[in-house]
Amino acid sequence: HCFKILMMQSGFALVESSFVRQKNSANIMMKNVSDLCLGCLAFWATGWALAYGVDASNPENTNGFAGTGQWFLIDEKDYGGWIFQLSFAATAATIDSGAVAERFNFK
């Protein structure tokens, strides 16, 4: 399922590039690639820990609002779950790129 969700990013990129002038299509593609790369790094470092992290040294230390451990996926064993949630987080970050189409460029 993760593959299908991550492929939505390429679909968004194609839709967005069809709505902009040809000279800005490369900027849209680059923005979507950078969204995915930076999204992966951010979700690896803090995203999973904030959403689902449990402190391995004190599992009873829970917080109803945010996670308390597993920063940088330390002591994490569910990598399939991480990839699945990453696909949603990265795709959500890509959806808004249509709003900034033709408003910036990579130089």
Image (tube, helix red, strand yellow):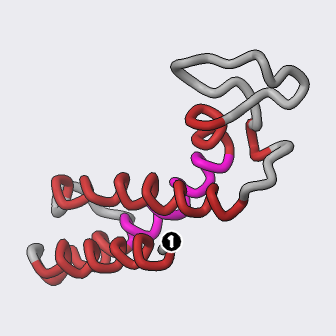
From the viewer's perspective, is residue 4 above or below residue 81? below
* x, y percent for residue 61: 75, 16
Mark 1: amino acid: Cys
Q: Is residue 68 left or right of residue 50?
A: right
Which quadrant would residue 45 be assigned to in this image?
top right
Q: Any magenta on residue 87? A: no
Q: Which residues are magenta?
A: 30-44
Residues 98 and 89: in front is: 89
- Residue occupying the point 11% across, 74% down: 20
- Check the picture and name the quadrant holding the C terminus: bottom left
Q: Is residue 32 left or right of residue 65?
A: left
Q: Main secondary structure of the magenta part?
A: helix
Which quadrant would residue 32 be assigned to in this image?
bottom left
- Residue occupying the point 68% across, 34% down: 53
Q: Any magenta on residue 34? A: yes
- Residue occupying the point 90% across, 25% down: 57
Q: In this view, which residue lies farthest toward the front?
A: 60
Residues 38 and 25: in front is: 38
Which quadrant would residue 5 be assigned to in this image?
bottom left
Q: Which residue is mark 1?
A: 2
* x, y percent for residue 30: 39, 71
Question: Within 10 angstroms of label 1, few (less than 14), some, or many (20 or more) residues?
Answer: some
- Callout 1 secondary element: helix
From the viewer's perspective, is residue 30 above or below residue 41? below
Q: In this view, which residue lies farthest toward the right?
A: 57
* x, y percent for residue 93: 37, 53
Q: Is residue 96 left or right of residue 38?
A: left
